[in-house]
Amino acid sequence: MAFRLPTLMALLVATVLSSGCADSGSEAGSGSALDSSVSESLGTPSEGLDDEAAVPEAEPAAESEATEVAEAETSDAEVAASQSVPAQQAAPQQAEKMTTGDWPMWGGLNGRNMVNGSTGLNLDIEPPESGEGGKAVRWSVPLGSQTYGNPVVAEGRVFVGSNNGNEYREQHKGDRGVILCFNEADGAFLWQLTREKLAAGRVNDWPEQGICSTPCIENGRMYVATNRCELMCIDVEGFHDGENDGPYEDEVDSEENDADIIWIMDMIDELGVFPHNLATSSPLIHGDLILLTTSNGVDEAHLEVPSPRAPSFIAVNKNTGELVWEADFPSMDSRAPERFANILHGQWGSPALATVNGKDLVFMPGGDGVLYTLDAATGELVWWFDLNPKDTVWELGGRGTRNAIIATPVSIGNDVILAVGQDPEHGEGVGHLYRIDATKSGDVSPQIADGDGWTANSNSAQIWHYGGIDQTGSITGEEEGLIFRRTMSTVAVSDGRLYAADLSGFLHCIDYESGQRKWIHDTFAAVWGSPMVVDGHILLGDEDGELVILKAGDSEEEVATLQFDSAIYSTPTIANGTLYVSDRSRLYAFQVQ
């Protein structure tokens, strides 16, 4: 199918995705859920963002011949493949009412699984038209003119990245990147973080895209990557408390409705990073560390990496803003095949984290199409996995078959799930989605070098692969049809099923155990955001401004399609009984519990 692409892009992110940056060859990101323990799958953290802190707030009951499809490895990965999805990962059915708490970061928790544990929801909602009317609408507020950030909810506030289209702060006119903070109860505007555009222009800071990073909130502090490639720590009170918290005290804007900056790490000045089109990664917190990808990328001609020695992955002390460790994969030590051994375009993905074999691992999506897994405490490389077949080719403008990574990894127990993608303006193309055994070490890619060619890797961590080309049409119904396409979206895993959206607008339901397709739904529009599973349903927005609600299960069943005022480039958020949806220029809060 064909779909309409926007004139300018952003990077999800996360995430799609998340998600947004742009280029006249342009970029997009996403930045862009609940982890594997029982408490993680049912709620979100109240006192910290490490997954073990997640505690739900329960309430009493009240109302193949195809090319490389689902390949199962015969190596040690079979052991991991035999593990079913943990029962606690399933979104609970509607037997009782369960209200989860805050949703303080992209994906809710460090595992980034796009599943929310709320139950007993009433999804009979209708969005207002131009801000008026609707059903079950608690409140709605205008955002900027383009919004690619995802709303997060914590400590009585809602935070979302956008541009300055609505000009909440009168002293700031024209294009800016902003984080808007609203009162969770009634949507009242509280404060705005305002960042001017970089002087270099679109090569580093694409016009009108705003801040696309999804903030992370913990203990009165907000952490976010700005359009200026800064990692910032902000007091969630803003200047409402009448205090200028330091050590940073040189804010240009220091009125009640402005952000109170605690510290800033300027990744351009301090680390030499050259963000391609936009810095978009959504940070996560682990102990005293902020983990982030820097968005280091290629030059405006898309031919060289101007800052090859600048790190792509960093850990920063959350209290001081000081660098703890850095890693310069892939610009200096890529583990991709030699002809692709560098950043291909930009790096807009976000990290995920899990504890595997007693060690805390951070999963960093590299701009060479390789997933790098590092020791979260030290930055030491543990293993790497090339998500592209070795015969793929990278060509400018998306004409090739090799892909980068824009989606966010998802960790489930000892597994990691991740797919490849490109800037949405590069159009449709073949995609690949993998379930990976996270317990190994070294090169765990499906193939390794063998003289001038490639051979199967006996150390491969591939459990299964979904994607490639359907040579006979036995899966897609079309000879040489694409089984899975490029994506910016992050997956959701629940109740033995994996839900993955691709850029072309298809939502795939895949058996988590085998990697085989169960069903596919066509939204007939491009999808930049990620599916959210909650209370036996899947919610997914698209570029036509529609939010589709489907039943989670083994067969395709559409429940409703809701029309919003403009394109939805983000992912729905559920927190404290309220569903939040942001379209391009407005944030909606629906009472669903």
Image (spheres, helix red, strand yellow):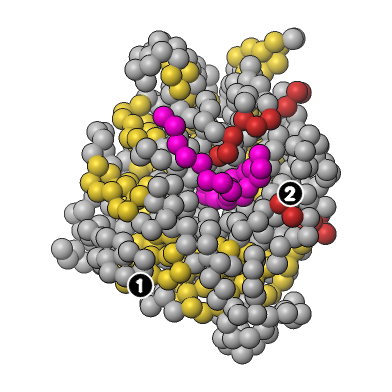
Q: Is residue 329 left or right of residue 350?
A: right
For discs 1 and 2, the disc positioned in front in the rendered view: 2
Which percent across, then down, holds residue 55? 40, 62
What segment carries the magenta color?
1-30
Which percent across, then down, holds residue 578? 34, 65
Mark 2: amino acid:
Val
Q: Which residue is depicted at the point 68% across and 26% down?
A: 395
Q: Quadrant of residue 240?
A: bottom right
Q: Is residue 467 left or right of residue 519?
A: right
Cα distance, mark 1 to mark 2?
37 Å
**Depth order, front residue of 545/80:** 545
Q: Which residue is depicted at the point 41% across and 40% down?
A: 525
Q: Is residue 239 left or right of residue 32?
A: right
Q: Is residue 567 magenta?
A: no
Q: Is residue 78 visible?
A: no
**Secondary structure mostly taken by the magenta-highlighted segment of the chain:** loop
